[in-house]
Amino acid sequence: MKIKIPLTILAYMAIASLTIHAQKKTELLVLPTIHGGHAKNVKYTFSHVSKIIENFKPDIIAIEIRPEDMDQDTVYLKKYYQPEMIMARIGYPGVQKVGIDFMGSEMDGKNLPANFSRDTVGEMGRFRITNQKLMKDSAIVKARIAKGLVSLKAKQGEMMGKLSANEMLDGTYDKVTDEYTRAQSEVLANTPYQYYDTFAIKRDQRIADNIKALALKNPGKRIIVLSGANHHNRIVNTLRPIASVNLVTTVKDY
């Protein structure tokens, strides 16, 4: 026997479904931080970062610390992580904190060893060593200058030194990062140093994917992400297509 449902009820069900879907929109602020630069930039200090977090009133704070290290004490954290990340990790009682960083596949599920910064075998160690080598290769140094990498890096440094959080969020810095990323890939392609670019992209994408997974698992929540400014472009590019996520691009820092 067929059951006929009145059109008014069907319309109500459709509206209710749309309402529920709308309620699940996740408010997500990806805050580009500048690490030690917060101690020098008077327009974007550690206090500004703290105020932004407080004013956003997050349900979740995502921090550029590996998930495996979120329960470690400050002595451990200070060896490997930036000050604003540690500040967020130990502050804001009652707010859920989630780690999003990545430092090499071989370290997944493990704490970082005491000699991690001197490692030359793991992914992160090879990344550091490759960087040191390429910066000593005169041909690569010349190619970096010719491609504009040196001037772009200087421009990033200048912007980090004088822009406010809202100015860092307006897309201007991300455009410079995009240009730098493309130029670096071109310079290092098919050279002995291509691994440096490959791992940099891999780490950026893993951080972005961790944030994406967090957003999808927490519909309707208010999530603030603290991540270095040079990761910001890839993160927002990964999140922008997600219909259930509203990317917040302005902040209150006072």
Image (cartoon, grey):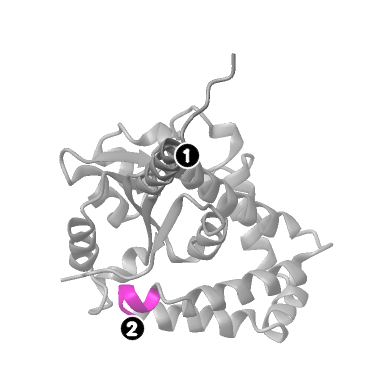
- Residue under label 2, please give it: 162
Question: Which residue is at 38% across, 44% downward?
Answer: 24
- Residue under label 1, please give it: 7
- Of label 1 and label 2, which has the lower sequence position? 1
Local crowd size for mark 1, using a 10 Å CA cut-off: few (<14), some (14–19), many (≥20): few
Q: Is residue 163 left or right of residue 200?
A: left
Q: Total of numbered circles in the picture?
A: 2
19 over 188 or under it: above or below: above
The secondary structure type at the circle numbered 2 is helix
Mark 1 → mark 2, Cα distance in angstroms: 59 Å
Local crowd size for mark 2, using a 10 Å CA cut-off: few (<14), some (14–19), many (≥20): some
Q: Amino acid at mark 1?
A: Leu
Question: Which residue is at 23% across, 79% downward?
Answer: 42
Please say whether residue 170 is visible from this viewpoint. Answer: yes
Quadrant, the C terminus: bottom left
Q: Is residue 228 left or right of residue 223?
A: right
Q: Which residues are magenta?
A: 162-168
> Residue 253 is drawn in which quadrant?
bottom left
The secondary structure type at the circle numbered 1 is helix
- Residue 155's x, y, as percent? 50, 84
